[in-house]
Amino acid sequence: MIPLSLLPLPLIHPCSESSCAYVLIVTAVYWVSEAVPLGAAALVPAFLYPLFGVLKSSEVASEYFKDTTLLLMGVICLAASIEKWNLHKRIALRMVMIAGAKPGMLVLGFMCCTVFLSMWLSNTSTTAMVMPIAEAVLQQLICTGIADSLEDSLTLTITQHNLLLTFLKSFLPIVPKQAPISIPAPPKKPKIRRDSLYPTKRDHMICKCLSLSITYAATIGGLITITGTSTNLIFAEQFNNRYPEAKVINFGTWFIFSLPIALIMLMLTWIWLHCLFLGCNFRETCSLSKKRKTRREILSEKRIHEEYHKLGPISYPEVVTGIFFILMTVLWFTREPGFVPGWTTLFEKKGYRTDATVSVLLGFLLFLIPARKPWPSAFSSEMYKHFTGDPLAPMITWKDFQRLMPWEIVILVGGGYALAAGCKVSGLSMWIGRQLEPMSGLPPWAVTLLACLLVSAVTEFASNPATLTVFLPILSALSETLHINPLHTLIPATMCVSFGVMLPVGNPPNAIVFSYGHVQISDMVKAGFGVNLIGVFVVMLAIMTWGEPLFHLSEFPTWALMPNVTGSL
């Protein structure tokens, strides 16, 4: 019924703008309602644009596979190697061991390792990997709490019994010998309440705090790198397509801008969760005294150490994966750092090499390098005695890659590119910009704040990639009309679209954490609302301070005029 009810729009006004608007609205409705899978809805422009004469079929098809797709494929190759050889688990457990077992520091430790992993892995994969480790620690905490309650009850009852016995013995000389003394029998083993999963309310609060902290940390970590989450990739590709002359967005500039945002958000979110669930006693949390450790903290630390020792010594594949991980990061940073010449200056032809070149090259090498150490030793023979089959088996196989490759996201991103191309060619972007001219009296910071609040609200009920794909062309047209640097609105909107943290349907990490049963929807709404406000505040602070000199936001760039010129031609 949706396509049929909207059909009068292109029929009554038969022009390219109305036809493109029809396709845009139909696709947006399917994305927001999720009546069909997101990837299937992203294919709507592939057949409607040619039918309405907006774009040729070959032109639409070329939008579905871009440079960022190759970038994502290379990153997934590395992620597959990390997960296959348990390097992610080793990193997570080591960071938690450093943090300690005090509830507040334990939460901070899990948040730090989740943020670090989410920089390189998808938010969903990171959450799905870290939550079982956190759940094992929480179960140990609960079991220890039940044992502590049992032990405390027995100790208290036996102490009362001994005091009574001592009191009676002190009066034995004055009691006649014929009078029998009735001494109560030892108490029976006290029963533990089974009406609640948690021994105490504080234990329940710790479980809530740790569970929610992981999904929030995964969201924060995804902001740091351009490949950290699909919305960052959508922004980068749409921005580079719309403004090809703007050579300002790459791995290095994005990292420099977003890293302080993530660090500030990490600390403020930890403080907010600590106050909400664990109280405001930060002196006890930050105390390094071993004398203050409780029995359950000691046992929790023991459980984490046991999990770490199960991994055994670091293996050869883990070393190779770690080297590739560091090498990919260094090559991304040094390609075009901006303040010094990058390694691309060594080549005669400029502009041919991107971050995707590095990503795909290193990803391809993982299919070539054997997973077994090339030189024999007794240690390596013992380590790989469980290996069967080809001794030259590579670090990863195509099945490993295929298991992690999010093809639905690739098609979704491609659908966004196709929509953006149609809006540009049909002139719909210019028409939207003209309708937004009444907002020209607002200062840039007010326009950016309104965009952040609007995107943050919509993304609570719709998927993050779909929300951003719909809003990017509108905000681009708005910025051009108001003569605001497009980055002033697009970057904050891209950041804030990830803050769908108030409901389980907001994003997959929320759903994963909610499925463990420690938190209720009311807990997510209450904690997520505070995290949402923290995120908008920090992003606005960043765009008004260090973002301005980094991206030259105070001036309207010449490259922002290019879409209007192209559209008029």
Image (cartoon, helix red, strand yellow):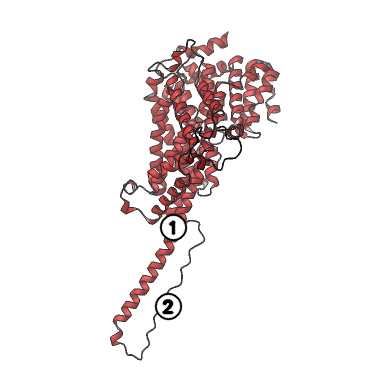
Q: Identify the mark at residue 145; answer none if there is no mark.
A: 1
User: Compared with residue 563, is residue 367 higher up or lower down, i.e. above or below?
Assistant: below
Q: Which mark is residue 118?
A: none
- Identify the image quadrant of the C terminus: top right
Q: Are marks 1 and 2 in contact (CB under 8 Å)?
A: no
Q: CA distance from mark 1 to mark 2?
A: 28 Å
Q: Residue farthest to the top?
A: 569
Depth check, front residue: 19 or 162:
162
Residue that badge 2 annotates: 185
Q: Residue at x 63, y 34 (%)?
A: 34
Q: Quadrant of residue 389?
A: top right
Which element type, helix, strand or loop, lies under badge 1? helix
Amino acid marked by disc 2: Ala
Q: Which residue is located at x 48 percent, y 26 percent? A: 226
Mark 2, secondary structure of its residue: loop
Q: Nearer the viewer, residue 519 or 255?
A: 255
Figure check: 435 above or below 511: above
Is residue 283 visible in this depiction of the protein?
A: yes
Up-down: is 398 above or below 156?
above
Could you classify mark 2 by the number of other residues whose Cα lies within 10 Å: few (under 14), some (14-19), or many (20 or more)?
A: few
Rendering coords of residue 180 (x, y %) = 38, 87
Which badge, 1 or 2, is on the more N-terminal residue?
Answer: 1
Q: In the rendered structure, which amino acid carries the disc numbered 1?
A: Gly
Q: Position of residue 401 (x, y in %)?
A: 58, 32
Residue lying at the far bottom in this picture: please name it.
178
Using the image, determine if residue 264 lies above or below residue 350: below
Q: 8 or 117: nearer the eye?
A: 117
Q: Is residue 416 left or right of residue 217?
A: right
Q: Is residue 503 visible?
A: no
Q: Position of residue 240 (x, y in %)?
A: 52, 18
In the rendered structure, the answer to whether residue 117 lies left or right of residue 398 reads left
